[in-house]
Amino acid sequence: MTQPVSDFKSKSGFKRILAATSYSIDGFKSAWTHEHAFRQELIVVVIGAIVALVLPVSSFQKLFLIAVLVLVLIVELINSAIEAVVDRVSLERHPLSKNAKDFGSAAVMLAVLIAIASWTVVLFNRFY
Protein backbone atom coordinates (compact mmCIF):
# COMPACT_ATOMS: atom_id res chain seq x y z
CA MET A 1 0.00 0.00 0.00
CA THR A 2 1.52 3.31 -1.04
CA GLN A 3 1.45 6.31 1.19
CA PRO A 4 -0.06 9.54 -0.21
CA VAL A 5 2.62 12.04 -1.24
CA SER A 6 2.23 15.79 -1.11
CA ASP A 7 2.90 17.78 -4.27
CA PHE A 8 5.17 19.94 -2.12
CA LYS A 9 7.46 16.94 -1.52
CA SER A 10 7.99 16.07 -5.20
CA LYS A 11 11.31 17.83 -5.70
CA SER A 12 14.64 16.09 -5.20
CA GLY A 13 18.30 16.94 -5.42
CA PHE A 14 19.36 20.44 -6.36
CA LYS A 15 15.79 21.47 -7.27
CA ARG A 16 14.76 20.70 -3.69
CA ILE A 17 17.57 22.86 -2.31
CA LEU A 18 16.59 25.76 -4.57
CA ALA A 19 12.91 25.38 -3.65
CA ALA A 20 13.72 25.19 0.08
CA THR A 21 15.85 28.34 -0.23
CA SER A 22 13.01 30.13 -1.98
CA TYR A 23 10.51 29.02 0.68
CA SER A 24 12.87 30.21 3.42
CA ILE A 25 13.26 33.63 1.80
CA ASP A 26 9.47 33.85 1.50
CA GLY A 27 9.22 32.97 5.19
CA PHE A 28 11.66 35.72 6.19
CA LYS A 29 9.80 38.24 4.00
CA SER A 30 6.46 37.26 5.49
CA ALA A 31 7.79 37.38 9.05
CA TRP A 32 9.28 40.82 8.44
CA THR A 33 6.05 42.08 6.86
CA HIS A 34 3.50 40.58 9.25
CA GLU A 35 5.20 39.86 12.58
CA HIS A 36 6.00 42.88 14.76
CA ALA A 37 7.82 40.75 17.33
CA PHE A 38 10.07 39.28 14.62
CA ARG A 39 11.01 42.77 13.38
CA GLN A 40 11.79 43.94 16.91
CA GLU A 41 13.82 40.83 17.71
CA LEU A 42 15.72 41.03 14.41
CA ILE A 43 16.74 44.60 15.21
CA VAL A 44 17.99 43.40 18.62
CA VAL A 45 19.88 40.56 16.93
CA VAL A 46 21.60 42.92 14.47
CA ILE A 47 22.60 45.35 17.22
CA GLY A 48 23.60 42.48 19.52
CA ALA A 49 25.71 40.86 16.80
CA ILE A 50 27.57 44.11 16.18
CA VAL A 51 28.17 44.54 19.92
CA ALA A 52 29.29 40.91 20.26
CA LEU A 53 31.75 41.30 17.40
CA VAL A 54 33.44 44.31 18.98
CA LEU A 55 33.47 42.97 22.56
CA PRO A 56 36.89 41.96 23.89
CA VAL A 57 35.92 38.30 24.29
CA SER A 58 37.02 35.10 22.58
CA SER A 59 35.76 34.11 19.14
CA PHE A 60 33.80 31.28 20.73
CA GLN A 61 32.10 33.71 23.12
CA LYS A 62 31.24 36.04 20.21
CA LEU A 63 29.71 33.10 18.36
CA PHE A 64 27.83 32.02 21.48
CA LEU A 65 26.42 35.51 22.12
CA ILE A 66 25.20 35.79 18.53
CA ALA A 67 23.86 32.22 18.49
CA VAL A 68 21.63 32.72 21.53
CA LEU A 69 20.15 35.81 19.87
CA VAL A 70 19.52 33.86 16.66
CA LEU A 71 17.88 31.17 18.79
CA VAL A 72 15.27 33.76 19.81
CA LEU A 73 14.53 34.40 16.12
CA ILE A 74 14.25 30.68 15.41
CA VAL A 75 11.78 30.15 18.25
CA GLU A 76 9.84 33.28 17.19
CA LEU A 77 9.50 31.90 13.65
CA ILE A 78 8.23 28.58 15.01
CA ASN A 79 5.81 30.45 17.27
CA SER A 80 4.57 32.48 14.30
CA ALA A 81 4.10 29.26 12.31
CA ILE A 82 2.03 27.77 15.14
CA GLU A 83 -0.09 30.92 15.31
CA ALA A 84 -0.63 30.90 11.54
CA VAL A 85 -1.75 27.27 11.55
CA VAL A 86 -4.10 27.86 14.48
CA ASP A 87 -5.61 30.89 12.74
CA ARG A 88 -5.88 28.93 9.46
CA VAL A 89 -7.84 26.19 11.19
CA SER A 90 -10.24 28.62 12.85
CA LEU A 91 -10.38 32.21 14.04
CA GLU A 92 -12.93 31.12 16.63
CA ARG A 93 -11.72 31.37 20.23
CA HIS A 94 -11.07 27.93 21.63
CA PRO A 95 -9.14 26.74 24.72
CA LEU A 96 -6.92 24.44 22.63
CA SER A 97 -6.09 27.26 20.21
CA LYS A 98 -5.22 29.47 23.17
CA ASN A 99 -3.01 26.74 24.63
CA ALA A 100 -1.14 26.30 21.34
CA LYS A 101 -0.49 30.03 21.06
CA ASP A 102 0.43 30.35 24.74
CA PHE A 103 2.86 27.42 24.49
CA GLY A 104 4.57 29.10 21.55
CA SER A 105 4.76 32.37 23.45
CA ALA A 106 6.22 30.61 26.48
CA ALA A 107 8.87 29.03 24.25
CA VAL A 108 9.86 32.48 22.96
CA MET A 109 10.06 33.75 26.53
CA LEU A 110 12.36 30.88 27.51
CA ALA A 111 14.61 31.59 24.51
CA VAL A 112 14.77 35.27 25.52
CA LEU A 113 15.63 34.32 29.11
CA ILE A 114 18.40 31.99 27.86
CA ALA A 115 19.79 34.85 25.75
CA ILE A 116 19.68 37.30 28.68
CA ALA A 117 21.31 34.80 31.03
CA SER A 118 24.01 33.97 28.46
CA TRP A 119 24.89 37.61 27.82
CA THR A 120 24.89 38.29 31.56
CA VAL A 121 27.28 35.43 32.30
CA VAL A 122 29.71 36.26 29.47
CA LEU A 123 29.76 39.98 30.25
CA PHE A 124 30.02 39.43 34.00
CA ASN A 125 32.92 37.00 33.56
CA ARG A 126 34.70 39.38 31.22
CA PHE A 127 34.29 42.64 33.14
CA TYR A 128 33.98 41.65 36.82
Image: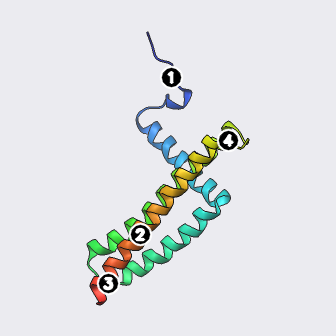
Q: Is residue 96 left or right of residue 111?
A: right
Say whether residue 25 is visible.
no
Q: Mark 2–mark 1 contact, CB under 8 Å?
A: no
Q: Secondary structure at mark 1?
A: loop
Location of mark 3 (residue): 124
The residue lying at 59 percent from left, 50 percent from top is 101
Looking at marks 1 and 4 on the same chain, the residue that comes earlier in the sequence is marked by 1
Q: Secondary structure at mark 4?
A: loop
Location of mark 1 (residue): 5
Residue 100 in picture, x, y percent from top left: 57, 46
Looking at marks 3 and 1 on the same chain, the residue that comes earlier in the sequence is marked by 1
Q: Secondary structure at mark 3?
A: helix
Q: Is residue 8 left or right of residue 12?
A: right
Location of mark 2 (residue): 115
* Farthest residue, direction front: 95
Q: Mark 2–mark 4 contact, CB under 8 Å?
A: no
As drawn, 42 above or below 47: above
Tell me the kind of residue under disc 4: His
Report, in whole angstroms, how far the alpha carbon at label 2 lies from the one at label 4: 32 Å
As drawn, 39 above or below 23: below
Report, in whole angstroms, how far the alpha carbon at label 1 lies from the one at label 4: 31 Å
The residue lying at 73 percent from left, 41 percent from top is 92
| Quarter of the figure with the N terminus | top left
- Density class for disc 4 (Cα within 10 Å; few <14, some 14-19, many ≥20) is few
Location of mark 4 (residue): 94
Q: Mark 3–mark 4 contact, CB under 8 Å?
A: no
